[in-house]
Amino acid sequence: MATNLDLDPRLLDRAFHLSGERTKKATVTRALEEYVARLEQRRATELFGELEWDATYDYKAERSRDG
């Protein structure tokens, strides 16, 4: 999808050099992927304390190859 963006050229140049990507498009794509991953990780950490823990769950038994 073609999109025109007015990006800060200094910021884009910094990201380009730091990322090691070969193109500015790849740099922006990588930056977006990392941004999305960070937001997803933050959401996952917000779930700690909200989910109910099953004290009877035996994770070692789940690792068994017999089961």
Image (cartoon, rainbow, N blue to C red):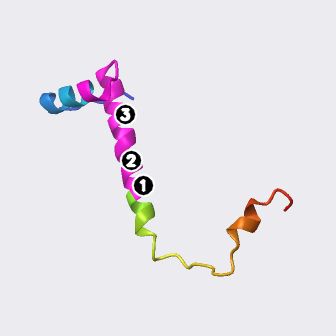
Is residue 2 visible from the viewing direction of this image?
Answer: no
* Dominant secondary structure (helix, strand or loop) of the stretch shown in magenta: helix
Residue at (19%, 26%) from the top-left corner? 13
Tell me the number on the disc at residue 36.
Answer: 2
x then y, percent, for residue 15: 24, 31
Confirm or deny contact between disc 2 and disc 3 (CB under 8 A): no
Q: Which of 29 and 64 is in front in this view?
A: 64
Q: In this view, does 2 lie to the left or right of 60?
A: left
Q: What element carries label 1?
A: helix
Q: Is mark 3 on a helix, strand or loop?
A: helix
Bounds of the magenta segment: 17-41
Amino acid under disc 1:
Glu
Q: In which quarter of the image is the N terminus?
A: top left
x then y, percent, for residue 50: 47, 77
Q: In which quarter of the image is the C terminus?
A: bottom right
Confirm or deny contact between disc 1 and disc 2 (CB under 8 A): yes
Amino acid under disc 2:
Val
Q: Real-space Cα distance between discs 2 and 3?
A: 10 Å
> Relative to 42, is 9 above or below?
above
Say whether residue 23 is magenta.
yes
> Which residue is label 1 attached to?
40
Quadrant of the rendered image containing residue 3: top left
Count residues near mark 2 (Cα–Cα under 10 Å), then give few for <14, some for 14-19, many for 20+: few
Residue at (17%, 33%) from the top-left corner? 11
Is residue 31 visible from the viewing direction of this image?
Answer: yes
Amino acid under disc 3:
Arg
